[in-house]
Image (spheres, rainbow, N blue to C red):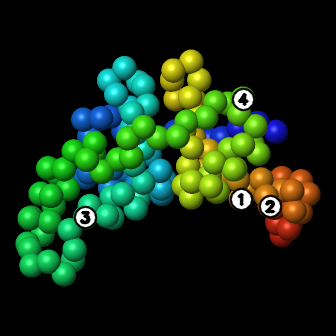
Amino acid sequence: MFVRDYMTTNVTTLREDARLLDAALLIRRTGKRHVPVLDLEDHVIGIISDRDVARLAPSMLARMTPEEYNSIFEATPITVAMTKGPIIVTPDTPVEEAVAILYSKKIGALLVVEDGKLAGILTTSDMLGLLNELLHGGSMEERAKKHRPARK
């Protein structure tokens, strides 16, 4: 089993010139918790998570107007909040190795790079899906078909 078999290939990304507001809106709109950050030549330079965004958000207890609150998101470059030099694997990395990295580093996602370009992302959710398949046999889609009520 290899990373290529379980990674997500349709990856939503942000550019290095994006702002914290862009990350917050993208994460909220897509429900993705990890977003790769690319430079202008499409090389991976970082990753930003929902927790990174929350960490830099002003406290709701602070005495500030909504405009002041929003201005912080608009003024903060994504490069301040992102993790620089994220851990990268290739599509040919064995799943066992990827899981060991996720577990030992206590991280939620690995970026998958091939030939210098982003090829996908492998998350703990992807690995939980694999665990579910291994524990219950067959893919989640196959089991969902078995448990889906018949339509009339």
Pointers 4 and 2 in contact (C-beta within 8 Å)? no
Pointers 1 and 2 in contact (C-beta within 8 Å)? yes
Q: In this view, does 127 lie to the left or right of 37?
A: right
Could you tell me which secondary element the residue under label 1 belongs to? helix
Q: How many angstroms separate mark 4 from mark 1 (CA)?
A: 19 Å
| Residue at image coords 30%, 35% | 16
Residue at mark 2: 132
* Spot occupied by residue 2 in the image (x, y as percentages of width and height): 76, 36
Screen quadrant of the N terminus = top right
Residue at mark 1: 128
Q: How many angstroms separate mark 1 from mark 3 (CA)?
A: 29 Å
Three-letter amino acid code of the residue under disc 3 = Ala
Res. 5 visible in picture? no
| Residue at image coords 56%, 58% | 106
* Spot occupied by residue 13 in the image (x, y as percentages of width and height): 42, 38
Q: How many angstroms separate mark 2 from mark 3 (CA)?
A: 35 Å
| Residue at image coords 36%, 57% | 52
Three-letter amino acid code of the residue under disc 2 = Asn
Q: Is residue 111 left or right of residue 46?
A: right
Q: Is residue 2 left or right of residue 136?
A: left
Pointers 4 and 1 in contact (C-beta within 8 Å)? no
